[in-house]
Image (cartoon, coloured by chain):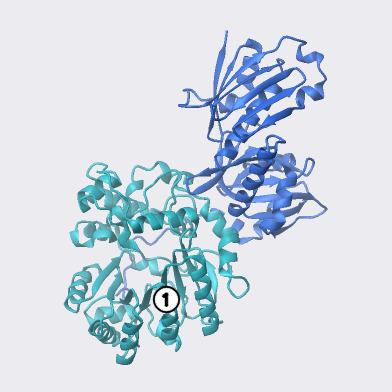
Chain colours: A cyan, B blue
Amino acid sequence: METRPNAMQRLQAQALIDDVPLSVILELTNRCNERCVHCYVDLDDVRGELTTDEVLRILDELRAAGTLFLTLTGGEIFLRKDALPIARRARELGFALRLFSNGTLIDEEKACAIAEIGPLAVELSLFSLDPEKHDAVTRRPGSLDKTLRAARLLTERGATVVLKAPLMHGLADERRAVAAFARSIGASSKFDPTIVSRYDQDDAPLAFRLTPDDFRGLCRDPEMGLAVDPSGLTPPDDGGAVCSSARRVALISARGEVFPCSQRFPSAGSLRERTFAEIWATSPILLRLRNVTWGDLRTCAGCVNASFCGRCHLDAKLEDGDFFGPSRWAREMAEARKDAFGRGGATREESVARRFDGKDPVSELG
Amino acid sequence: MKTRLNLSIATIDVALTIDDPALAARSEGRYADFLRQAAARSPLEIRVAAAPGPPPDDLHPEWVANPAVDAVGTLDRVELRGLGFAGFLDWSARRGECVVPAAQAHVDLFVRVALGVELLRRGGTLLHAAAVVRDDFGVAFSGPSGAGKSTVAEISRAAGLTVLSDEMIAFVPAGVGRRFHGTPFWRGAPLAAPCGALVFLEQAPRHRARRLSPAEALPRLMAAGGAPLPLPDVQSAFFEAAGAVLRRVPAYALEFLPDAGLWDALDAFPEFSFFRPAPPQAPALAPPAGPARP
């Protein structure tokens, strides 16, 4: 069935063609009051955090560059005293703002201020409703109660809250209770099977990844939707982008370094030395990445499972040694997706038609 | 008897119909790596007729190798004339005709002009550069004649790298990406790789590299050349294309000695060293046993 792209899809497609940094993740700090077992941030590296003035200047530069979706994340953003003024300024500049937080530092006053600022969503990390399990992930006893309190305070004041968690081995089943709790307080929930190595390339977090069998189980759950469904994946066209990294997505570290999507890449440049526009237009690492398409991937371009694969360049490089090669983990997940959704080799279009009545859900990805 | 050769060079399809058997045989050998089995849907059709006149051996060898050309026209259509040859190429009508001495260089000239202008019309361009594939990216080496392009190509071949071309490459848009393609001018392969770097060569008693801003690189790129004809429209389009190249390809100046150590100077940049394939490590697909897990 032919589907006509909606406005968001057209915007995202055009941003890919024109290299507009539509979505930027700004890490305000590496500091965190939790120590999540799977976290990719180097939490001990807290040197040289951007000052308030520097962050505000960067917001202006991002607006000029065409950024629409801005995510403020950390570490824990509310360990910075200026997190709310920064968020407020971001909204004044017209960004569709997301705040990532563990919620433990959100009290009534902050919840009121956040609701008044009006972000697109406040996304709180919640791994389980069982304190033993949640606190085992955060490695901070009592953290669950604080996160749940923040979720309630925010929703009661009209803020849009998303309870989200990476899907980890041993905890994937917790998603049902988390989703039910989210519904009960008027929030939504979001789950992601992606666990990556740390910024310093320590692969300890990978121990918490789903196993292929875990993932197969999730693929059978109709409520998982885009977290596992291949409809949300980039189609493997010869001249098509493999991912949005360096094209319409960028990440800025707490020290003001620009990255294509993750600090696991080399830095594209420092915003303390050059403007965002200059780095975005001329950084060699960004330029190189923009020239790579599906057709350049030696093995993956001809793979029969390509339509089911969420391959990541960095995972392929850092875990399997070859940036242009296949990622073993992605391949395992692709096989599981194909088993669940492929039914003998369905195309992406067929999957969209069957699962979503022909209405392509990619726009939900934001 | 006419011979039809279906060429595919840097994504451009060219069909040569040659009425001289000897010239057809030479052209078939010349473009052997770029021949395609089936005819393309709408190639540039170029009819080549051998002119009556002296055989190539009677002509001055330098002229045979580098025929001087007078050209008039635009990006839509040009007429080409020179000693003993004449012809036209019409990109709007997707066809051309030429009468040439039975010398291969004249066929090459028409094919090169047809390809170069077609690329400009599609947002790409020919570049006067050698290119090799390293870590799956195309690395182009440019500079004036004698700067060392062929030397770098030879060093790279000896090191086991794939050489796309030793003298002239094509910069081609590929969807949202950009690729360097090999061409048959003069020794190349029908291969392509995503654009990784454009390196301007300067022979020196040491290896040393530095990044160039687009403003620094543009005059170097223009000086190296690559415009297929000295016509205002074509030169203007090449200038635009050179800008497009430098918006998508990081540029460097490389002082180098003619040895493989030149790569060490480039590997000092993370955008070169990061993409080196490394020995694979076993990913933790299954979690380890023990109490560390939640």
Residue drawn at point x = 51 percent, y = 25 percent: B36
Q: How far across and down, in percent of the image, does residue B184 sit?
A: 63, 31
Q: How far across and down, in percent of the image, does residue A244 sit?
A: 44, 58
Asked if A269 appears above or below B4 in the picture, the reply is: below
Q: How far across and down, in percent of the image, does residue A352 sit?
A: 25, 50
How busy is the neighbourhood of tag 1: few (under 14 within 10 Å), some, or many (20 plus)? many
Q: Choose top left, top right, bottom left or bottom right for residue B156.
A: top right
Q: Amino acid at mark 1?
A: Leu
Instruction: Count all numbered tags in the image, as a single digit.
Output: 1
In which quadrant is the N terminus of chain A drawn?
Answer: top left
Left or right position of B274 against B157: left
- Which is nearer the eye, A80 or B139? A80
Residue drawn at point x = 25 percent, y = 85 percent: A157
Left or right position of B254 against A222: right
Q: Is residue A170 visible?
A: no
Residue located beneath label 1 in the image: A72
Residue drawn at point x = 81 percent, y = 25 percent: B62
Q: How far across and down, in percent of the image, does residue A211 sit?
A: 30, 60
Q: Choose top left, top right, bottom left or bottom right for residue A127.
A: bottom left
- Which is nearer the eye, A74 or A17? A17
Asked if B248 appears above or below B1 in the picture, the reply is: below
